[in-house]
Amino acid sequence: GTLHKRDGALVADDAVLGDKVQLKHSTVGANSKIGAKCKINNSVIFDGVVIHDNCVVQNSVICAGAVVHAKSNLNDVQVGPDAVIPANTVLKHEAFTADSPYDDDHPDDHDDVDSATAA
């Protein structure tokens, strides 16, 4: 697909942008979807990324196929291919991959893994 300029950003022709999306100094790849009221600043959004409503993405790279759920705030974050960021996540100066354990609010997750491997 082709990229076109939009408010100081480069956006793929087939990217879908929701209402009141703010883009500054960023690139949005093909087949990506940016939800309503998102703010994307100084970031690269690869192909096939879905960013749900009311997210803030600054100084970050979101690799192909990743999903960022609603009301997340990412600042200086590298999100790997096909990674899924849960809703209401706040990350700063971090790397997040598809197999990152996201257990800040779920300390029991590791117990499940241990019992599965022991069985």
Image (cartoon, grey):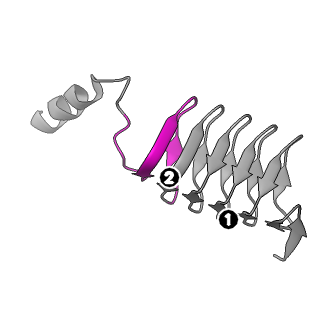
The reply, left or right, for residue 84 in relation to residue 32 is: left
Above or below: residue 53 compared with residue 24: above
Q: Which residue is mark 1?
A: 47
* Quadrant of image for the C terminus: top left
Residue 18 in which image quadrant: top right
Image coords of residue 49 (percent x, y): 66, 55
Q: Amino acid under label 2?
A: Val
Tell me if residue 29 comes above or below residue 101 in the rendering. Answer: below
Mark 2, residue position: 77
Q: CA distance from mark 2 to mark 1?
A: 17 Å
Q: Position of residue 42 (x, y in %)?
A: 67, 60
Q: Secondary structure at mark 1?
A: loop
Image-quadrant location for residue 61: bottom right
In the foreground, 117 or 52? 52
Q: Residues within 10 Å of mark 2 (few under 14, many from 20)?
A: many
State which region is magenta.
Answer: 81-102
Report the residue that reaches farthest toward the bottom.
Answer: 2
Query: What amino acid is at disc 1?
Result: Asp
Query: At 16% from the left edge and 33% from the top edge, which residue is drawn?
Result: 114
Q: Give 27 or 76, whichever is nearer the viewer.
A: 76
Q: Residue at x 37, y 49 (%)?
A: 99
Mark number for residue 5?
none
From the top left corner, tell me how far across and down residue 73 is, in percent. 59, 38
> Is 18 placed left or right of 83 in the picture?
right
User: Looking at the image, is mark 2 or mark 1 earlier in the sequence?
Assistant: 1
Asked if residue 91 lies in the magenta stretch, the reply is yes
- Between label 2 and label 1, give the one nearer the viewer: 2
Location of residue 100 in the rendering, given as x and y in whole percent from the top left corner: 36, 46
> In the picture provided, is 61 more to the left or to the right than 34?
left
